[in-house]
Image (cartoon, grey):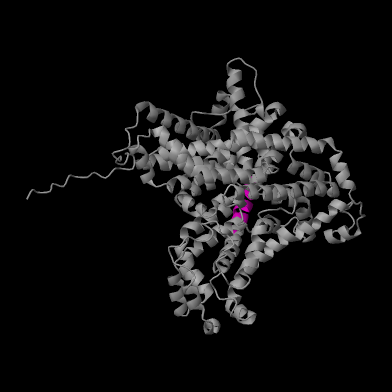
Amino acid sequence: MTAVIDKPVRKPGPWAAPPRPVWEEEPSKVGLASKGLVLGIACLAILFPLWIVIVTSLSTRKTIDEAGGLVMVPKDITFIAYQELLSGGQVTRAAIISVLVTLVGTAFSMTVSVLCAYGLSRTGSLGHRWILMTLLATMFFSAGLIPTYLLVQTLGLTDSYLALILPSAVSVFNILVLRGFFQGISQELIDSARIDGAGDFRILWQIVMPLSRAVIAVITLFYAVGYWSAWFNASLYLNDQDMMPLQNVMIQLVQKQEAPVGLGQAIKTGQLSGLAVQMAVMVMALLPVAVLSPFVQKHFKKGMLTGAVKG
Amino acid sequence: MSHSTVPRSRAEAKRKTPGEKTPVASGDVTGSEDKRPSGRLSLKVRFRRDRLLLLMTLPALVLVLLFNYVPILGNVVAFQEYDPYISDNGVVSMLNSPWVGLENFQRIFADSAFWQAVQNTLVLFFLQLVLFFPIPILLALLINSVVRPRVRAIAQAVLYLPHFFSWVLVIAVFQQLLGGAGLLSQLLRSHGYDGLDLMTDPSTFKFLVTAETVWKDAGWGIIVFLAALASVSPDLYEAAAMDGASRWRRIWHVTLPALRPVIALLLVLRVGDALTVGFEQILLQRDAVGPGAAEVLDTFVWWNGVRNQDFGYAAAAGLVKGVVSIGLVLAANKVAHLMGEQGVYKK
C-alpha cells in the first residue's frame, strides 16, 4: 500500500485567484492589465468626484482659495462647515425633517408592503388574482402628473408631510419582489405552524419574516433611499420653505449658489467658505446611503432576481 | 382557530414542492396554478378562510386604488377649461369648470413647444439606447471575468453606489465638476484657456444628461446580467474549451447566448417606455439650459400645469403621452412574446 500523501491544500485568500480549471487558459499579462485598467477607471470615475466633494467640505477657507475652488489634496482638515450647518438653522431643520420622513415613511411602506405581499403569497385564496391584477396593471400606466396633483390637493394633503409619504408609499414592484420571496419559503414549515395553531399574522411574524431577512433588508433600503432622495413631491406639495427636506434645500444651495439662511453672515465675515458649506450639505445627503448600501449589497442579487427583469 | 374547520393544510400541502421555482421568479406573476380548492368551496367559506389574508392586502390595495386609479378620473380636466380657483376642493372645481371638448388637444397639436418636447424626448431616448444601454452589458462581462472574490466585491460595491444617490446630488456633483465654477473650468483657466460651462450649454445638454444617467445607473444595471451569467453551467464552457474554442469564442458562443433573453427583454421594455426619459433629472436642469434643449414631454406637462396653472392643457398633454405610452408598452410586450420571451405579463 502506498500511503496517500495529502498535499496541503491552501485555501485561496480573498485577494487570491481561486484554482483554475485545467481547460482554462492562463490569463495573459496584457489581458489582466487592461481588465484592471477599465475597472479601475470606472471605479475612479465614481469615487473621484465624491472624494473631491468630501475633501472640499473639510477644507479651510484658505485651502479652498489657494486651490482656486475645489480641493483635491486634503490639508488642514476642519469640521467648521459641519459645525455651522448642524448648529441649528435651515439645514439642521431640513436634515431632521428628512430623517423623520425617511424613518416614518419607510416603516409605513414596509408594513403595508410586507402585509400585502404575504396576503398575496398564498395562491388560490379568495380574490387573490383580482387583487394581483389590480396592482400589476399600475405598472403599465400612470394616471398623469396633473390629475395626481389635483387629487393630493383635493385630499387636503398640501402643506402636510403626509403628501411626502402617502402618494408614493407603496411600490408594486417591491411588493412583487417580497411576494416572490415569501412563496419560496418551504410550505411544510408553514403547514406545521398552522397545525400547531398559528394564525396568519403569527406565521408571517415568526416564520416568514425571519426567513426573509435578506429580501426585507433590500426592500427596506429601496424604500428608505426613495424617501431620502425625494424632492419632487416636496416641491409640488409644500409651499412653506421651513418644511422643506434636505434635498430641496440642497437644490437651492448648489444650483442657485445661495447661502443657507443664517449662515450668510459667517460666510461674509470670511470665517467660512460658501463652497465648503455647499459640499458639506452634499456630504450630509450622500453619507447615509453610502454607509448603508454596502451592508445590504450582498443581498441585492438574490433580492433583485425575483423581479429585476420586470423592472 | 375559527378557520381550522376548513381543510386548509391538505389543500396547501398539495400546492407546491419546496424546490419549485416561485411563480414570480419563473415569470408567472399571476400565479396561474391555483391549487387551493376554489370550485368546491362556497364563497362564504372561502371568505371566512381567507379573510385575514384579504385584510392584509387591504392597506396596499386602498393606497393603490386611491393614488393610481382615482386620478385617472381626474383626466377629465383635459376636456375642460379647468379653473382651480372655483373652490378649494378639486372635485367641486372640476364639476363647475366649463367643458371645451377637444380644444385643449387641438391647441397642443398646434403648439410648436409640444413638438419640440416630443423631439427632445425621442432624441434623448435614442441617445440613451445607443450610449447607455450597452454599457451595463459590457461591465457585467468584465466583472464576470474577474475571478478574485475580493476585487469583485469591491468593484461591485463601488459601481452600485451612485444608484442610491438622489438626482439632486448627482447633478450637484456634475455641477461641481463640469459647471462654470467647476473643476474642469478651474483646470482650463489655470492653464490659460477660457473656462467652460457644460451645465448651461444647450448644444451638449442631451449628452450631459446621458452621461449623468451612465454615471448613476450603469453600475446598477449590471445586476440583472450578472444574475443571468451566474446561471450559466460551467460545463458549457468546459465543453466549448474541449472543442477548441478560444476565450473570445466562448464569450461569443456561450456567454452572449445566455444573456440574449435578458438583453432582448430589457430592450423591449425600454422601447415600451420610450416617452419617459429622466423627468426629475431634466426638471432640475431645465432652467439652466432653457426649454428649447431640455423640455421633454414630462417637463412640458409640469411646466404648463404646475407652473402656468393651465391644468386642462397640461392634463391633455399628459393624457396624449399616457395613451401613446400604454400603446408602446403593449406593443413591446407583443414583440417580446413573438420573440418567445416572457413579457411583463403572460400571453
Q: Quadrant of residue B237?
A: top left
User: Can residue B313 be seen by looking at this rendering?
Assistant: yes
Q: Quadrant of residue A267?
A: top right
Give the main secondary structure, helix, strand or loop, of the magenta stretch.
Answer: helix
Q: Is residue A94 left or right of residue B20?
A: right
Total numbered badges shown on the rendered structure: 0
Image quadrant holding the C terminus of chain B, namely: bottom right
Q: Is residue B58 left or right of residue B149?
A: right
Residue closest to the eye, A69 or B25: B25
- Residue at 68% x, 66% y: name it: B62
- Residue at 62% x, 46% y: name it: B269
Q: Is residue B9 magenta?
A: no
- Establish if A230 lies above or below B286: below
Q: Which residues are magenta?
A: A91-103
User: Can residue A287 be seen by looking at this rendering?
Assistant: no
Task: Locate residue A153, reporting x and y percent.
Answer: 78, 57
Residue closest to the eye, A129 or B191: A129
Residue closest to the eye, B105 or B66: B105
- Residue at 48% x, 35% y: name it: A43
- Residue at 37% x, 43% y: name it: B149
* Residue at the extreme left of the image, as rendered: A1
Task: Locate residue A256, reporting x and y percent.
Answer: 70, 35
Q: Is residue A95 magenta?
A: yes
Q: Is residue B160 left or right of residue B115?
A: left
Task: Locate residue A199, reporting x and y percent.
Answer: 51, 77
Task: Locate residue B131, reporting x and y percent.
Answer: 59, 33
